[in-house]
Image (spheres, rainbow, N blue to C red):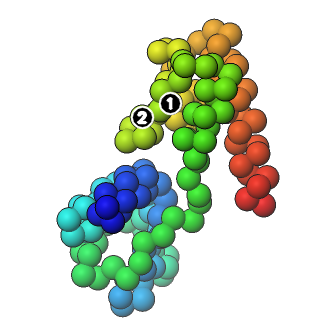
Amino acid sequence: MYRSMLESEIRKMLGKVVGVRTLSGKDYRGILLGIEPTNLNLILGDVKGNSGENYYRLILNNNNVAEIFVEKGYLDLKKLSERLERIFPKMVTYNEQAGIIVVMDKIRVDETGVVDGSGLAAERVKKVYEEFIREEQSSQS
């Protein structure tokens, strides 16, 4: 169970800006492009180091990593899908692994908003998404 929870959290971190602190005390900030689940080797992109250095790509061996952290919280897509389900009963599916909510088999929503779909229903989904984002941001403040 712990392993599947760890892998789920790792998948959520992919594509996000993360901070990494090495055992030698170096700090890096970049986009997590890849992580090997078995040994936690990392690939970061668009990396900035704490000494001002910039790297296009950085591969870190897990033996040198002290901590990995995400500075900005995740959007709770499950909670958003439940809200959409109240408005569009039995027409919402949430694929946790893909990080996608599908409404009426044609409107796709991810952490960034409505990514596919048009029309009145898509506009309604967009409004629900924007309201949800505002509420989440105000509750984090």
**Along the line of sight, the residue nearer the viewer: 81 or 57:** 81
Taking the image as drawn, is residue 56 in sight? no
Q: Are marks 2 and 1 in contact (CB under 8 Å)?
A: yes
For the C terminus, the quadrant is: bottom right
Q: Residue furthest left?
A: 38
Image point 42% across, 89% down: which residue? Answer: 25
Helix, strand or loop at label 1? It is strand
Residue at numbered disc 1: 101
Quarter of the image where one finds residue 130: top right
Task: Please give the count of numbered marks on the rendered protein.
Answer: 2
Image point 50% across, 30% down: which residue? Answer: 101
Image point 56% across, 53% down: which residue? Answer: 74
How far is the residue under mark 2 from the one under mark 1? Answer: 6 Å
Q: Position of residue 122 (x, y in %)?
A: 62, 17
**Along the line of sight, the residue nearer the viewer: 4 or 47:** 4
Q: Please state which amino acid type lies under the numbered disc 2.
A: Asn
For the N terminus, the quadrant is: bottom left
Residue at numbered disc 2: 95
